[in-house]
Amino acid sequence: MHHSYESLDGFGGGGGAESRPPGSGSLLTPLRDRDFRLLWTGATASLLGDGAFLVALAWQVYAMSGGGPTGMSLVGIAMTVPTIAFLLIGGVASDRLERRWLLVGADLLRALSVALLAGLCIGGQVELWHVIVLSAFYGTGSAFHAPAFDALVPEILSGDRLTQANALDQLVRPLALRLAGPALGGVLVAVAGAGGVFLLDCATFLMAAGTVLMMSPARADRPQAEGGSLIADLRDGWRFVRSHAWLWATFVSAAIAYLLFMGPVEVLLPWIVKEGMGGSAFDLGLVFAAGGLSSMLCAVGLGRFGLPRRGITFMLIVWTLATLAVAGYGAANAIWQLMVASAIFNGLETAGTIVWATTKQRHVPTALLGRVSSLDWLISVGLLPLSFALTGPVSGAIGAQATLIGAGLLGAIVTLAALYVPGMRTLDDRADRAHRRRAVVERRVRELAT
């Protein structure tokens, strides 16, 4: 889901440089800021727990549902429907209320959900309906956390530090969520069972809430939207999105692409590892880990060399290639081949996401950023319940591998098509004109100097 380059002072953390020369900064530079360091530490711990949680959840659900994809589809629906239902409210709340407290509340709600799930697993009383209900509460917490987090970061950082922070996020996210977390989850499932993993995830949510509470309130808490009705606030956010093709066209293309491939990937990839290839939870962790390592390398590269000038074009091309890699999951017949497909998918997805996140934070007004982020999430993931619902019957009719191949091919077509929406590359063209003007000025300066 997750724009372009329009130097608008005061937008999304300020109009920093569009790109920076190699060696002009470090990925670790944002950590010099105490508030960002606290936010980053808690978020990293939470991502580590979530990476382990995803492996344990899939293994637990498949164990209860007899190995078929239907149970996992139901859990996916239960987790995404509340997220979608509450995203707009979460976006308005993040522009009206103290964003710190929204993050704390969301983390505590998710901590309680996984704690109850851990207790049921350890007590040997867990049933599929328990997982579905608690997943719904988990998804509700995510609806308030995502827009508040997106809007809080550019309040703390600006300019190149914002780019570096997004690159750092995309370095740590796969490390925790796709590499270390799944590897830890695979080991802990074998040693302590799924309940032990859920307890670990609960502890990381509590740690995240604690670090956010330690942030400076005067700096972090700046409600931007006051007065007016909920509907009026939402209308303001939608009006801004509708007036920028780089926003609404990306939202729509992501929604259709996610409809096509997200359900099949989330539901069928664990099934292929477990049933199709006779693999273990550790093997599934290896597949996730390969994607995590690739994501880290891409994040380091963009953090080191800066963003491309034609950001929108770059973003959609790498996302198209990433979506094609989903077809690789279906074509694979060995664990190592799944690892290669995972590396391609996650690495390219990360590269596009860094561009998207930085551009959105730079070029959306701070007062609207929570609402625009909530619309981003809402539209992009709005069809995910349908994606999960269709995965079971479609894969039952044509097979898991054919479903993944079709999803990857069709998703890539949809993603690439967004590049040709009128006005989509306006910001790229603007960046090119600015680059040419700078080149002319630099040439004249050299001529005068000689």
Image: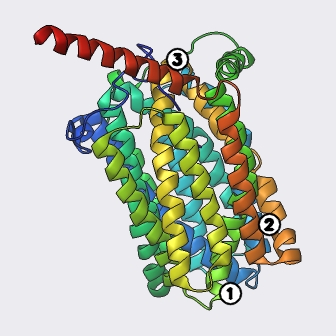
Front of the two marks 3 and 1: 1
CA separation in Å, label 2 and label 3: 39 Å
User: Is 142 situated above or below 427?
Assistant: below
Residue that label 1 marks: 276
| Cα separation between marks 3 and 1 | 49 Å
Is 21 or 172 nearer to us in this picture? Answer: 21
Instruction: Give the residue at mark 2.
Output: 391
Task: Identify the image quadrant of residue 401.
Answer: bottom right
Q: Secondary structure at mark 3?
A: helix
Question: Residue 209's spot in the image, x, y percent?
Answer: 42, 46
Name the quarter where the C terminus is drawn: top left
Badge 3 crowding class, 10 Å Cα cut-off, few under 14, some 14 to 19, many 20 or more, is many
Is residue 422 visible in the rendered image? The answer is yes
Q: How is the image coloured?
A: rainbow
Badge 1 marks a residue whose secondary structure is helix
Q: Can residue 181 be seen in the rendering of this structure?
A: no
**At x 54% / y 35%, what residue is drawn?**
312
Residue 447 vs 426, above or below: the answer is: above
Q: Residue at x 39, y 19 (%)?
A: 436
